[in-house]
Image: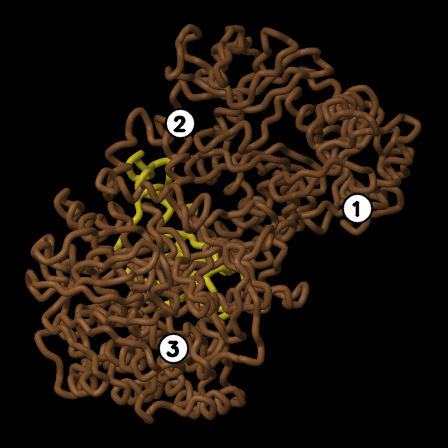
Chain colours: A brown, B yellow
Amino acid sequence: MARMPHGGRIDRTQPLSFTFNGRHLRGFAGDTLASALLANDVTLVGRSFKYHRPRGVMAAGVEDPSSLVHLGIGAAGEPNARATQVELYADLVATSQNCWPSLRFDLQSGFDAVHRLIPAGFYYKTFIWPRWSLYEGAIRRSAGLGMAQNLRDPDVYTHQYAHCDVLIVGGGPCGLRAAEVAAARGDRVMLVDDQRELGGSLLWRGAGGIAPDLPATIGALATTSNVQILARTTAVGYYDHNLVVMHQRLTNHLGKAAPNGTPRERLWQVRARRVLVATGATERPLVFPDNDRPGVMLADSVLHYLRRYAVVPGRRAVLFANNDPAYQAVFALADAGVEVAGVVDIRASVSDALAAELARRGIRLFSNSAICATHGRQRVRAVRVGAMPSGPTTTLACDLLLVSGGWAPNVHLFSQSGGKLRFDDAQSCFRPAQSAQAVQCIGAANGLFDSAIALREAATTALAPASADLLQWPSAGAGAPGTGDPLAIQPFWRVPRGLGHGRQWVDFHNDVTVDDIALAARENFVSVEHLKRYTGTGMAPDQGKTSNVNALAILALETGRDIAAVGTTTFRPPVVPVTLGAIAGRHIGGLYRARRLLPAHSRHVSMEAMIADYGGWMRPEAYPLPGESFEEAVRREGLAVRTRIGLFDASSLGKIEVAGPDAERFLDHVLVTRVEGMTVGQIRYFVMAKEQGIVFDDGVVMRLGADRYWVGASSAHAAHVAQTMDEWLQCEWPTWQVTVTDATRQWATLALAGPESRDVLSTAGTDIDLAAERFPHMCFREGLVANMPARVARVSFSGELQYEINVHAGHAVTLWDRLLAAGASEAIQPVGMEAWLGLRLEKGYLVVGIDTDGTTTPDDVGSAAWRKKTANFIGRRSLMRPHALRPDRQKLVGLLGVDPAKRLPVGAHILASPSALPPCATVGRITSSMLSASLGQSVALALLANGRARIGETVTAYFDGQRHMATVVPLPFYDPQGARLNA
Amino acid sequence: MLLIPCPFCGPRAQIEFAYGGQSDIVRPKTPDAASDQEWAEYLFFRDNPKGSHRERWCHRDGCGLWFNLLRDTVTHRIARSSPVDEPRGGNA
């Protein structure tokens, strides 16, 4: 009779079939997986984390510590789904986790037999020699929860942002009352609840006729325009300035019927002027020997299953409690026809009213007693009741044991918001005390367990005036005092050793017992934070929802302190686990981050270039011909530039326009290089430093006009350079008349490089006089190229005669096509980044961030001309510090591999002494390297201590167990006189 | 995530802003004359208050302007937000 013949909020006209561990079972629409399992008399659901103990469903909501299952199969599968939170759908497939070969016969349950050998902290003490990593794999495999799968998740997830006047978390009686009141005065209200239907505890527990009428209230709210109701939505995180993150399940409950392509889950970020936390309270289990057997359940959860799902999870029940409200569950069971074998109460006596109710139903009461043992392997079969403090004992047969140790307000969100808690001795729980943001707990979440008081307070709180300050709750009534003592609770934290033996479980999720906490206390882990880390209590997906207060109380007993003095651990987001898919949202695959495309990107794609990410820009690496390897393509492209001509897309180069009467003065202050004295049409190489004297960027600066300059920053740093210039302008020199405009994306830059580039540019058609004597290296001209307005610069990163042609970005493809056509007779080759970086390496040109690091100064890379400057440029003073002037600083030098056919590895360290074995002192490292086709050499750039004084020496570079000999040489390797680029 | 009042655009989410550290760091007027110690203090030494902190922010994905914020490092309460409008000399 697990399912009652009638009643409950299930739809009996919609039977659903599902499988659990391959067994075909049936439930109804409206069931959760947990209620459907219990209805089928399935009590063994999983195996525990460490000892592989049999575990069943213990609770009905998010607090259930044990019922984690794997949902679905294959790519859409989901590990660690909590059966109490999974709505049943047709053909649902659920499997137990952490057991092998099967749930009933789990071989690793042998760990339980040797539990005395493996208490808390066992790993820390045992697996330290020779190192933890040797054991880690095996231990992680045997302990744990579900298995993440490595297939691509086929589902879609999304994000949404919202604002509201008042966010009400929890749609129980107090949440509903607060929503009514706030909506009536015109507030924009968001009301969220983690269940499929609103109502909270009203769905299984009445409130004596004073609570809102459920259908009428929900119906009215749903049609109020300033109220937004979100069901199946859990507020999981509370962040600064009243930002609440919520996790909404949109189609999870539909199973295969979910429409294709619609999001499965949505992550909300809501900024609320006020937040009302109406999340209720969680019932605490009692701690006694072998209290973890399947069939041991929280009392209120049993009532929940009975009323909401018409499920009775047993045939013969016993209640073990220390408070009045817990009795409601056994009365309901008895009234439903379930045999109640007895009620065991810690208290010496109960009220006359309760005693009368017990007598009326013929239920036997064991007062001043505790349960000191349970029997049964995969399900509880009997319990032993002992009179306090040391016997005698009576055995009661039962297959369902209801427990209740009191209630803990769900203060997770309040605590995350920075709110302070205080321990309420009368009700033995932590309650909200002082808000740190505009947040207030109402109802049971505020420790108010009397419905009438709670509802009145919810309405008053909702009516409090809003403050403009998100960090200020306007009313001074934070943490209203508890009135009356409706729980009538007598604290009870564990069974004394005189009465019971065996392990008493505190944290069912992490397999932590009373003995583990005692051990931690003996070993002086007396801070709650240390206790948590040493034993694992309160960790992992469960976050100690049922175990937190019990663990603190036992630590308090063990260390002779009050619970208030022990305190509580920090509540961290998320309150319940959130799928990684929901957190990632749409930011996956190609949308993982913004990618910048060159204006001629479509051409590179149509030419089948290999495209890669270079500092956020998607750029061609190489253009391999059919049948050609990457290395062959790079070699061919490089040689084409050296011998004839190549075409390179340099559009990502920074183009920052600096204009205004103070432009020259400004640039002389932000660049290490001198700008003063440049003529219009002239180009200079520049280095830019940070105030600490470190190289920040390099590039070329052009003087466009009397008060206009173009700063050609490097591709990867251009945006940052423009931002930095603007920062100095705004914050240090706000009166200077200068504007800084990043025009990088407005221009396309195509570079013709190679001895034939003048002829090819001429063939493409230009009105610019290209004669070397009138248009020399390091100058630019403006005119038409292939009938497009262009700014043509003679600069060279390749070391050959080179023209960089800048046109409107919209002309990029046309210009690319025209230049390729003009160069066809010279066998022009498109050149990718890999070959281009090789060409610059042969010339000894550095790339900031690759050939420099966070310690490299302009002097270190050979830029010493700043000493002639008078302007107080950024970084100047730092270059005069003793450290910047040390002779043994690492300088940029060239290396020639002693073996010309062996590439020197980038990242190799140059050893201080060639014969030393690492670990040993190093004096530098290789930053870039290549096998140069045009030089027939293995060449590299390196930062080497006192490098310029070591020209001609042979050094030893060490990488991954190998030594490489190299000779230190001056830069550049190629065309030292510069005859080719000046051609 | 903080809600930061940009003095020009109004309250916006922190994700739109860039942090610039402590405000009112005065660049020495004649750096060449500054001692190494003075220069190091300008470069590296910052307050680390528990409480009120005057700091610079830039509304990078908004108006692009820098401004000053008076923020409590414990409560995150923002007491004041003001433009960087007083020229403080600069390079000398």
Given the image, on which type of amino acid does mark 1 rest? Answer: Ser
Question: Which residue lies under the disc numbered 1?
Answer: A602
Residue A315 can be seen in this image: yes
* SS for dot 2: helix
Q: Residue at x 21, y 67 (%)?
A: A396
Q: Position of residue A335 (x, y in %)?
A: 31, 84
Instruction: State the image quarter where residue A875 is shown.
Output: top left
Classify mark 1: residues with Cα within 10 Å, few (<14), some (14-19) or many (20+): few
Instruction: State the image quarter where residue A607 is shown.
Output: top right
Q: Residue at x 78, y 22 (%)?
A: A636
Left or right? Give the position of A213 relative to A696. left
Which of the image's four quarters has the C terminus of chain A? top right
* SS for dot 3: helix
Residue A969, placed above or below residue A264: above
Q: Are marks 1 and 2 on the same chain?
A: yes
How many labels sit on residues? 3
Discs 2, 3 touching: Cβ within 8 Å: no
Question: Which residue lies under the disc numbered 2?
Answer: A884
Label 3 resides on the chain identified as A
Q: Are marks 3 and 1 on the same chain?
A: yes
Question: Which residue lies under the disc numbered 3?
Answer: A306
Label 1 resides on the chain identified as A
Mark 3 or 1, nearer chain start: 3
Classify mark 3: residues with Cα within 10 Å, few (<14), some (14-19) or many (20+): many
Given the image, on which type of amino acid does mark 2 rest? Answer: Ala
